[in-house]
Image (spheres, helix red, strand yellow):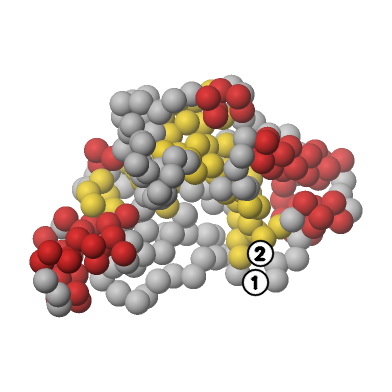
Amino acid sequence: MKNISLPENQTYCVASFEDLVSTPFHGEMNAISWTRELRGDFSEIVHKLELKENITVVSQENLFELELTKEGQLAREILLNDMKLLKAHGASPTLNLIKYYEMDDTYPFFPTDVYSFHVDRSPIPTDTFLCTYYGEASEILQNSQAEQKVLVPEIREQLKKLFQGSDEKFESFLSEHFFDLHYQAKTNANLINLGIGHLWRLAVDHPESKTLPCIHRAPKEKTGEKRLLLIC
């Protein structure tokens, strides 16, 4: 698999936050990017923040407490403004400083952590917003180049052995344990890197959705390098 430029049929680029939140998903298009080249030194913020756990939630107060150079201050203003815009839109943004995510080894043949390609699901209409300001960027996978893991015969057989219940309740079992949210890339599939500084809106699986949910995953972090990620 390799990283490529954005396919026009699935992704769409806009030039403002207003267009990001108002452009409707339709057809195969399920990922919209507010494409930006950000000013400021985000690495300064990352290195001055205290990482208390593998993932530390960074509050606005944490950002205000940092003594920063002019470039660091520019980066802080962008972070605060992005959170302000998303809150005004009705979202609940969280800024995370990430060393690494916990990996799921409950079922070695079927990890369900965020490093696995997956879609988000909600009982109400909503979208996923995310932006990587520093570190490795998130990735998405074209729906046409992915297959739902629960439909892969070998994996499905192992899940049935794990379930050991009636066929009528098997699908409910898959949903209750979130197995049906996970995908794997087809042979020679092309990964789409979301890049640094771009604020993305991804389609979610919900009852009123008019497009397929966007398949995405967290990247494997580089050794010793943290990520600064805004997500909601």
- Across and down, in percent, residue 205 comes to 36, 44
Q: CA distance from mark 2 to mark 1?
A: 6 Å
State if disc 1 and disc 2 touch (CB < 8 Å). yes
- Across and down, in percent, residue 47 comes to 75, 59
- Residue 218, numbered label: none
Above or below residue 151? Residue 72 is above
Corner quadrant of residue 212 = top left
Question: What residue is rendered at 40% in x and 43% in y?
Answer: 204
Q: Can I make out residue 4 in this image?
A: no
Above or below residue 111? Residue 217 is above
Label 1 neighbour load within 10 Å: few <14, some 14-19, many 20+: few
Residue ID for mark 1: 53
Determine the secondary structure under disc 1. loop
Count of labels in the image: 2
Question: What residue is rendered at 31% in x and 26% in y?
Answer: 27
Using the image as rendered, state which of residue 106 and residue 23 is in the foreground. 23
Q: Can I make out residue 126 in this image?
A: yes
Using the image as rendered, state which of residue 82 and residue 52 is in the foreground. 82
Question: What residue is rendered at 61% in x and 39% in y?
Answer: 90
Q: Is residue 58 left or right of residue 110?
A: right
Q: Which amino acid, by three-letter code, is at mark 2?
A: Thr
Above or below residue 4? Residue 185 is below
Determine the secondary structure under disc 2. strand
Q: Is residue 170 left or right of residue 128?
A: left
- Across and down, in percent, residue 185 comes to 27, 50
- Across and down, in percent, residue 180 comes to 27, 57
Q: Is residue 79 left or right of residue 134?
A: right
Question: What residue is rendered at 30% in x and 74% in y?
Answer: 108
Label 2 neighbour load within 10 Å: few <14, some 14-19, many 20+: some
Corner quadrant of residue 34 = top right
Q: Which amino acid, by three-letter code, is at mark 1?
A: Glu
Residue ID for mark 2: 56
